[in-house]
Amino acid sequence: MKLQQLRYIWEVAHHDLNVSATAQSLYTSQPGISKQIRLLEDELGVDIFARSGKHLTRVTPAGEAILKTAGEILLKVEAIKQVAAEYSNEKKGTLSIATTHTQARYALPNTIRSFTEQYPDVALHMHQGTPLQISEMAADGTVDFAIATEALELFSDLVMMPCYRWNRSVIVPKDHPLCQVSKLTLQDVAAFPLITYVFGFTGRSKLDEAFINEGLAPRVVFTAADADVIKTYVRLGLGVGIVAEMAYDAEQDDDLVSLDASHLFEPSVTKIGCQKGTFLRGYMYDFIQMFAPHLERELVTEAFNRSNKAEIDELFRDVELPTL
């Protein structure tokens, strides 16, 4: 059994069983991959993939178990490489982050700027997606860190650490009737068509819960994953926008009014998560603390030493989170 063979079966499984695409991503040949997979299956005495002719059709039950262990082995191998890299050149390497548009656009720029100034030789890669996609990328090792508000808790093999609290603003044009209301109520907001985030994005679940608890059924006429898109359609008069408070810029959005809605909705918490067993290099600890100053190295290390989500939550129970 060769490490290369484990890499091949792992990559094929994560390229939708497309051997040709896998070969392109690994800069090798399709026949070479197919041959090594067959050699591994012959050695193990089981089929990892079911086939129809020359095409792989599904992962077998035995293959599922083998792939799980192969993933753990490849993660350990990567950790060994990271340890070696840390001691050979502690300020050079790569860092990959998966996050949502809101985090990338409004929460991360200052952190990214500070990090790149301190670590110019670390190649930084940012992936954007849905919270579920982001969590999956962290869980399978595609990225080092996932930063999101929702879906991270669905993956038990992620260490999740709270970064900050945030709430929402109601965004309207300057001449909108809601501008005349001294203190908004949910009934006030629900009286107008709404424009907000797609379900599963940026704390949308907290928003829906608030209306449901008041027995209200607001008319959501447009949803988007991008706060800038939401503001565009508010400008067009399509409806009242509800976005993360951080997504309103008083200078760039001076044609709109941001109305405080923090008393209407429960605050949400954005977390940073990474796979259990990840070897964190020095610059990774620094990135975490740049983004969330209370997440000092000792606290992060302790979080990794906790065995389950409940213990991690207990660790952070009394930590005062900043509000963004």
Image (cartoon, helix red, strand yellow):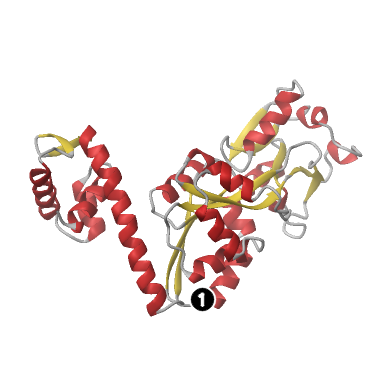
Q: Is residue 192 left or right of residue 23?
A: right
117, above or below 271, in the image = below
Q: Percent position (x, y) of residue 75? A: 34, 56
- Amino acid type of the residue tagged 1 in the rendering: Tyr
Q: Say if residue 59 shows up in the picture.
A: no
Q: Percent position (x, y) of residue 178? A: 84, 37
Q: Which residue is mark 1?
A: 119
**Secondary structure beneath disc 1?**
loop
> In front here: 4 or 115?
4
Q: Percent position (x, y) of residue 82? A: 38, 67
Query: Which residue is painted at 73% across and 30% down in the image?
Result: 210
Q: Percent position (x, y) of residue 102? A: 60, 51
Q: Residues within 10 Å of mark 1 (few under 14, many from 20)?
A: some
> In front here: 43 or 55?
43
Q: Say if residue 103 shows up in the picture.
A: yes
Query: Which image quadrant is residue 295 in?
Result: bottom right
> In front here: 23 or 236?
23
Give the total of numbered labels.
1
